Amino acid sequence: MKSKIKSHIKEFYKIIESGNKEEAHQALRQAIKTIDKAAKKGHLHKNNAARKKSLLQKKFNLLAS
């Protein structure tokens, strides 16, 4: 599960660097979904999951503005 999270986050960062807002939004949604599943199953602490999601959302908001 942790490797899936890392993979989705890396994919999100690659798309952010390319500057494609639509693809970045889809990648963000997928990463958040995976992080939420991991937190629900106990693979990540809920605060750790919240911190990861917050960081990803901040990066996306910088691209969107």
Image (cartoon, grey):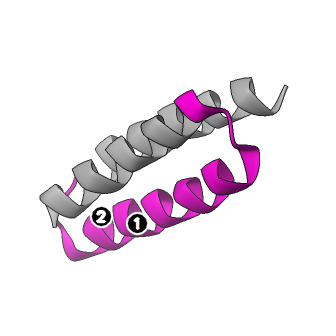
Q: Are marks 2 and 1 in contact (CB under 8 Å)?
A: yes
Q: Amino acid at mark 1?
A: Asp
On the image, numbered disc 2 is attached to which residue?
A: 39
What residue occupies the far right of the structure in this picture? 65
Q: Quadrant of the C terminus?
A: top right
Percent x, y for residue 34?
Answer: 37, 67
Comparing 43 with 34, the one in front is: 34
The residue range painted magenta reads 17-44
Query: On the image, which quarter does residue 16 sit in?
Result: top right
Q: Is any part of residue 16 visible from this angle?
A: yes
Query: On the image, which quarter does residue 64 sit in?
Result: top right
On the image, numbered disc 1 is attached to which residue?
A: 36
Q: Amino acid at mark 2?
A: Ala
Percent x, y for residue 3?
Answer: 14, 57
User: Measuring 22% from the left and 63% from the top, which residue is drawn there?
Assistant: 4
Q: Is residue 17 left or right of residue 20?
A: left
Majority SS type along the magenta span: helix
User: Measuring 49% from the left and 66% from the top, which residue is drawn there?
Assistant: 30
User: Measuring 30% from the left and 64% from the top, which residue is drawn there?
Assistant: 39
Q: In this picture, is 11 found above or below 57?
A: below
Q: Is residue 16 left or right of residue 42?
A: right
In reply to whether residue 58 is colored magenta, the answer given is: no
- Numbered badge on residue 46: none
Say what secondary structure mark 1 lies in: helix
User: Measuring 56% from the left and 53% from the top, which residue is drawn there?
Assistant: 28
Percent x, y for residue 26?
Answer: 62, 62
Q: Is residue 1 left or right of residue 21?
A: left
Badge 2 crowding class, 10 Å Cα cut-off, few under 14, some 14 to 19, many 20 or more, is some
Distance from label 2 to label 1 (Cα)?
A: 5 Å
